[in-house]
Image (cartoon, grey):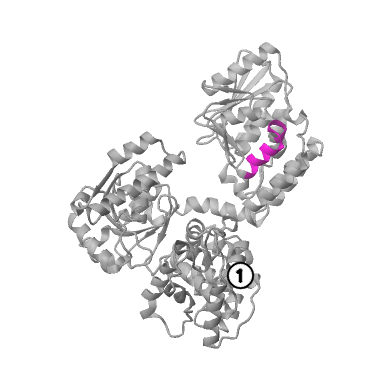
Amino acid sequence: MTNPVSYETQGEIAVICIANPPVNAASQAVRAGLVEAFNRFDDGPAKIAVLYAAGRTFVAGADISEFGKPLKDPGLPSVIKHIEAQKKPVVCVIHGTALGGGLEIALGCHYRVMLRGARLGMPEVLLGILPGAGGTQRLPRLSGLLPAIDIITSARQVPAQEAMELGIVDALSDEEPLTAGLNLATELLVKAAGPRRVSEMPAPAVDQAAIDALRAKVAKANRGQIAQVTALDSAVQGTALPFDDALTNERRLFMTLYNSPQHAALVHAFFGERQVAQLPELKGVQPRPLAHVGVIGGGTMGGGIAVASLLNKLTVTLVERDQPAADKARAGIEKMLADSVKRGKLSAEKRDALLKDALTTATDYEALAKADVIIEAVFESMDVKKEVFGHIDRVAKPGAVLATNTSYLDVNEIAAATSRPADVLGLHFFSPAHVMKLLEIVEADKTAPEVLATGFALAKALKKVPVRAGVCDGFIGNRILKTYRTAADHMVLDGASPFQIDRALVNFGLAMGPYAVGDLAGIDIGYMTRQRLLPTKDPRERWGDWADKLYELGRLGRKTGRGYYIYDDQSPRGRPDPEVDEIIAEERARRGINVREFTDDEIVERYMAAMINESAKVVGEGIAARPLDVDMTLLFGYGFPRWRGGPLHYADQIGLDKVLATIRTAAQEDPYFWQPAPLLEQLVAEGRTFASLNGE
């Protein structure tokens, strides 16, 4: 195997190059190569060394292939200590990105030059750990304590100019990496500069009041997570210790986090996001062209789909029912693109070019004749969608992919409205479609493999996280949502309040509780869903009427100022409404329900058991291909805390036997709702986990 670290000399300068494409990850081979190279430098005649990387970036982090495996020698801390201990000066060149262990390597060098346009950062907290190779100790000695803590706990990437202003780097350059390094090395040789070790610099000053305020801010911003606050503590504690002791303390804290459930969950999420797009049955299947996207319907969803396509270099033709609707759709798209300009995501010139050259609005289906992919985004009605697909079938070119953006409806029935069901699939975008990352790709019974592959290719082009789903009411996410939301409604009928349930679940880590989400989406959405399902409702199913009462009172959530919560100038984010408690109490009394109290722990236990049980049914029925598909759906579309890894990863962590016991206990009260998933029972009987079904 070729050594990824090379060594050569140019006069009095040793040149050490890391070449481990694509991102020069700090693998075991790179670490060993660095030790060997610096040994040669130490023993050789060169008076100064330049460390740089080949390709488009400096070291952009750890080698992900080593995640979850025993750490191999030489460890990164010892490699960096070896570099820093050199008796002759070492210059590091940062280009592209220097992230995580890459930045720690740079901090172990004596001088740093950074190319303009490069960025540096420490994203370790995103994986539930902290910089464990001196990052929490060396960075504060250069930038100061508070800026270092901000960089480490936010995981943000710092641009070159800011890095220079903070003192993290010594010089900026517009040259190529090697030239930039050689120039600084030559200057240092002229000055006869010696090593300048960060470890020998004084510890930064500590403003305890400022640290306390920052700690509270970090804890609030990362509710429930442990890595960010632990990283802060490591940096602060290190200021009161000799440097070697500070490194020992940092490593101790690193290993505590490394062995924590949160790290395991975040690694699962990291790999799951990449694995979910890889379906074995699509290996070698070529997608169809997708340069031109047609969108039918210019409302919130259709407009968002159009914007997502435009922002990712696709041509868009949007069709509306008449000219006023088409004009309104274009205005909505213009507004969304203007927001992108305002946020600095898009230049005004690029926006104008997109609107002029890449977007066409029309009122005739014939305008879609050249589209590669046509996405219907009209009202959620089977009759309306089937009518639209009849028109699409008439005008779409042979081989065009015909997609429906539906949240619940039967894609097989929609496909049957065409003469080419093999070309039809579901593309369930989440609102706002140009922001939300999840895309459920629904495979109907007759969907051709290359059409499914095109759905995944479109997701990649739009920078979405794609999840393949089978056909059922609600597919993966909304089917599971209906079940765990029903469990919450049952607890409300039995004595809990919507506000207590929301509080317990937010404390668990959800971004919002189910009733706050209901207000955000609109209570009318839930009402219409219940009305749609009413004809098929089983008489054994418990179904509270109190949410329908809110709808009848015109309390539709945030858009009307009242729903489950009250929204006004006093409480723009909502405050509990005593009238909701009264409406619920009236229904309990009318039904003769014996009210009982629920603890927050009971609420979380039942809510999660319902979510896990329905998830197991979805996997067992093949609606989701693997447990990780469910986890990614809930993580990217439904606000499940990433640091818990998804519901089925969480189930593995707490124990499937415990989950099953909760379900069986609840089934004594309601055997219709609490029916254990056969897959869950099977896994418990066999002593297996959901992870075993992912091939982990």
Stretch of the chain drawn in magenta: 140-153
In this view, 375 is above or below 385: above
The picture places residue 322, in percent across and down from the top left corner, at: 22, 55
**Camera-side residue of 28 and 164:** 164
Q: Residue at x 42, y 83 (%)?
A: 538
Is 382 left or right of 200, judged from the image as shown?
Answer: left
Q: Which residue is mark 1?
A: 500
Quarter of the image for the N terminus: give it: top right
Label 1 sits on what residue type? Gln
**Camera-side residue of 58 and 187:** 187
Using the rendered image of the protein, determine whether residue 73 is visible from the camera's viewpoint: no
The picture places residue 407, in percent across and down from the top left corner, at: 38, 64
In this view, 672 is above or below 142: below
Residue 148 is a magenta residue: yes
Question: Regarding mark 1 in the picture, which secondary structure is present there?
Answer: helix
Residue positioned most to the front: 569
Residue 389 is a magenta residue: no
In this view, 36 is above or below 434: above
* Tally of marks: 1
Residue positioned most to the top: 190
Is 134 left or right of 572, judged from the image as shown?
Answer: right
